[in-house]
Image (cartoon, grey):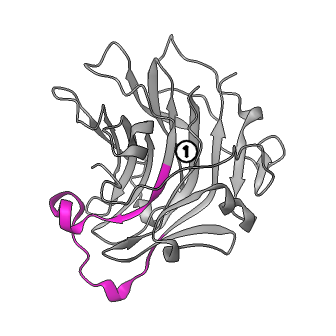
Amino acid sequence: MQYLKSFALLAISFIACFHTTGGIVSAAVSQPLQTSTATATPNPQARRLCFDQSKVFWFKNSSAIQNFQVVSCAQGIKVENNQLVLQQLNSNCGGTLMYPNYIRQGGMWDMQMQVAPSQGIISAFCLYGQEILTGGKADELDYEVSNLTPQIAQSMYYVKGERVLGDEYQYNIKTPDQQIFSNTKHIYGIEYNQDYVNWWMDGQIRRTVYKGVRNKFPADVGLLRFGVWDGSASSGAWAGTVSDWSRGPFNMYIDWIRFTPYC
């Protein structure tokens, strides 16, 4: 499902954030992270990710949130107990952030998070093309969890805002023991470049889409957005519906977010 379509577009005017100090530490001196390079399918085109050059936004440092821009529902965004908390407060207010810099050269964004509970609530981690900023049709890569199917994380992609007809734009990912995603924390990652896209989970590549093998390829996806949204009204058959808003807020928790460049 495409995400954030209904949000008001904001004028963007930001300085580069990777070189600021608030909440960013080198992965080389941070706590251990998942950095396995195991692949589901051998990839002769594989490029090497340089984890020793990663930039990590740790939310145990509350200033890390300053590196991101609010897209929607500022009142549903906070740092608490060393975690970033993104809340779905009601049907119209779901906390959503974006990283304001477009990273054209490719690499991998990943984050350790626990998705929000409740049918109808979607936890989303997405990469877009720059057209999304001006209301245009953008390429898109998604990781989304719908609690109608709580043991499935869905990997999806779009080319210029459209599903790829005749191709499997959506693919379901499960943990080996089929855990319910809202009960535990996992590391979700999307790696992108001009030749292929990998969806990672817990240090393992779980899906790959290659340029030239697929009908169309999402080649322009350097803008990170993530948060929660209510899928009840537009996508009830896919997302389910929230049966009782008084049980909220419905929270998504993130320990850290990382960008890793290629060597």
Look at the image and tell me whether residue 185 can be seen.
no
> Is residue 126 covered in magenta?
no
Asked if residue 54 lies left or right of residue 21, the reply is left
Residue at left offset 81%, top offset 40%: 28
**What percent of the width, then of the height, locates residue 208?**
41, 27
What stretch of residues is rendered in magenta? 225-251
> Is residue 240 covered in magenta?
yes
Mark 1 lies on a secondary structure that is: loop
The quadrant in which residue 236 appears is: bottom left
**What percent of the width, then of the height, locates residue 262?**
65, 24
Instruction: Decide which of 12, 248 is in the foreground and name it.
Output: 12
Q: Amino acid at mark 1?
A: Asp
Asked if residue 115 lies left or right of residue 263, the reply is left
Task: Identify whether 156 is placed above or below 251.
Answer: above
Instruction: Locate the C terminus and report the quarter of the image it occupies.
Output: top right
Other-residue count near label 1 (Cα within 10 Å), few / some / many at <14 / 14–19 / ≥20: some
**What percent of the width, then of the height, locates residue 143?**
40, 47
**What percent of the width, then of the height, locates residue 57?**
69, 53
Instruction: Decide which of 191, 217 is in the foreground and name it.
Output: 217
Task: Identify whether 123 is placed above or below 134.
Answer: below
Look at the image and tell me whether residue 21 can be seen.
yes
Dot 1 corresponds to which residue? 202
The quadrant in which residue 80 appears is: bottom right
The quadrant in which residue 209 appears is: top left
Instruction: Decide which of 180, 132 is in the foreground and name it.
Output: 132
Residue at left offset 29%, top offset 49%: 2
Q: Residue furthest right?
A: 29
Q: Residue furthest bottom?
A: 246
Count the numbered circles shown.
1
Instruction: Decide which of 235, 200 is in the foreground and name it.
Output: 235
